[in-house]
Amino acid sequence: MLAGDGRSATAWAANRLSREYTVSRGRGGRERARQLLETGRVALFLDGLDEVSGKLRAAMVSALGPAPFRLVLISRTKEATLTAKKARLGGAVALELQPVQPADAAE
């Protein structure tokens, strides 16, 4: 799937976009999706990193590292921490969402 270089990650993402979204379907759709990714006009939000097995999760993060597009990986804290010990994303920032009290949300 991903071979660890930005082109492979972009090809994978463009293929997924061309299958999932109407704007990228049809003739030339995969190329349009690739251009959007490479020019930073699309960011990927990938949820479920914590659902991928440990070794594969680290390989996936390593393969996505050199990708030219913006990326948000969503994971449970424990799995994200374990993965960060094995594979790093350059320029990455880790955020942990905290619960919001009902009164604060109501304000």
Image (tube, rainbow, N blue to C red):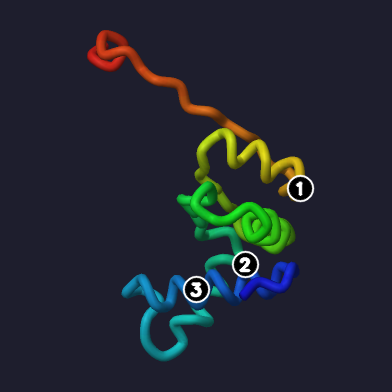
Looking at the rendered image, the quarter that the N terminus falls into is bottom right
Residue occupying image coordinates x 49% and y 81% = 30
Q: Earlier in the sequence, mark 1 or mark 3?
A: 3
- The residue that disc 3 covers is 33
Where is residue 18 drawn, in percent x and y? 43, 77
Q: Within 10 angstroms of label 3, few (less than 14), some, or many (20 or more) residues?
A: many
Give the residue type at disc 2: Glu
- The residue that disc 2 covers is 38
Towards the viewer: 31 or 89: 89
Q: Which mark is residue 34?
A: none
Q: Within 10 angstroms of label 2, few (less than 14), some, or many (20 or more) residues?
A: some
Relative to 74, say whether 4 is above or below.
Answer: below
Towards the viewer: 39 or 24: 24
Where is residue 21 drawn, in percent x and y? 35, 71
Q: Which mark is residue 86?
A: 1
Where is residue 22 drawn, in percent x and y? 32, 74
Relative to 35, 62 lies left or right: right
Q: CA distance from mark 1 to mark 3?
A: 30 Å
